[in-house]
Amino acid sequence: MALKLVHLHKSYPAQGGAKPVKVLENLELELEPQQSLAIIGQSGSGKSTLLSLIAGLDRPDQGQVILGGQDLTQLNQRALSLYRAKNLGIVFQQFHLMPHLTALENVALPLELLRRSNPKREAQKMLDAVGLGERLGHFPGHLSGGECQRVAIARALVVKPSLLLADEPTGNLDEKTGQSLSHLLFELAESQKMTLLLVTHNKELAKACKTCLSLSEGALHVV
Ligand SMILES: Nc1ncnc2c1ncn2[C@@H]1O[C@H](COP(=O)(O)OP(=O)(O)O)[C@@H](O)[C@H]1O
Ligand SMILES: [Mg+2]
């Protein structure tokens, strides 16, 4: 799915007498379908803010977020949630798994919300694909960090999204686990013909992407 960001502005309101924080200023981006883009940048430069705008989890102050021709800023909350569930996969640094659900139930959940057929069977296939076929009944608390991130990747990919957004997906993992997860991510992205947008500090992961841009002073720059 193609992604286009037009004149994007985002600031956070002043808190406790401090000035408002201008995070994104006139940010522009065009990403072709099935491309991979890595975004790097210092802590606090606005990378997570940018991802949350692209995911429609937050709204820009000004500008457009156009995904597959649809401007997300024009959708109401309900339409936005549905659009996100159908088209986007999101992987967070902290996994954000449901602690009271098993690995299988976590991955089946988005399919159940979308009323797809055979949620458990599809979830099992996806967990097999990420190498966790033997951990279906485990709760997140009984899985390692790398295993939790694989469950999170399976959950993001099980709906076959057109765009996968990942915010420092290997940030909480050791180097080796991080590497095998990035291989997995690229393999699955290719086989499912997804567009990939990663925020990462991991040089290997950034290098594996077709394009790498750096976020600083509110905008994206060629590295
Ligand atoms: N909800 C919020 N309210 C106020 N300020 C925020 C909020 N979220 C982020 N910020 C500020 O916006 C800036 C960018 O944050 P963030 O997007 O998380 O950066 P990064 O992901 O690149 O580390 C930081 O200075 C942060 O303090
Ligand atoms: Mg961040």
Image (tube, rainbow, N blue to C red):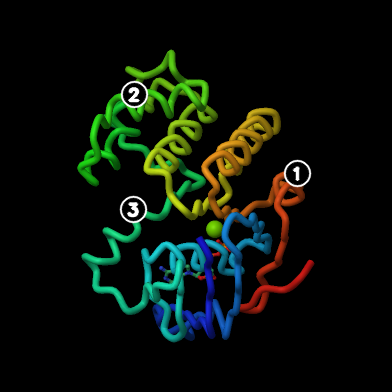
Closest to the observer, 217 or 89: 89
Callout 1 amino acid: Glu
Where does the image place residue 11, in percent across and percent down from the top left?
47, 80
SS of the residue under disc 1: helix
Instruction: State which tag comes first along the sequence, 1 or 3.
Output: 3
SS of the residue under disc 3: helix
Image quadrant occupied by the C terminus: bottom right
The disc at residue 119 is none
Q: Disc 3 beta carbon < 8 A from ligand 2?
A: no
Q: Pick out the residue farthest to the top.
A: 134
The disc at residue 86 is 3
Q: Which residue is mark 1?
A: 204
Where does the image place residue 183, in percent across and percent down from the top left?
66, 35
Separation of disc 1 and disc 2 at Cα?
Answer: 30 Å
Mark 1 against mark 2, which lies toward the viewer? 1
Q: Disc 2 beta carbon < 8 A from ligand 2?
A: no
Residue at image point 72% right, 60% down? 211
Residue at image point 36% right, 38% down? 97
Q: Which residue is mark 2?
A: 139
Callout 2 amino acid: Phe
Instruction: State which tag comes first along the sequence, 1 or 2.
Output: 2
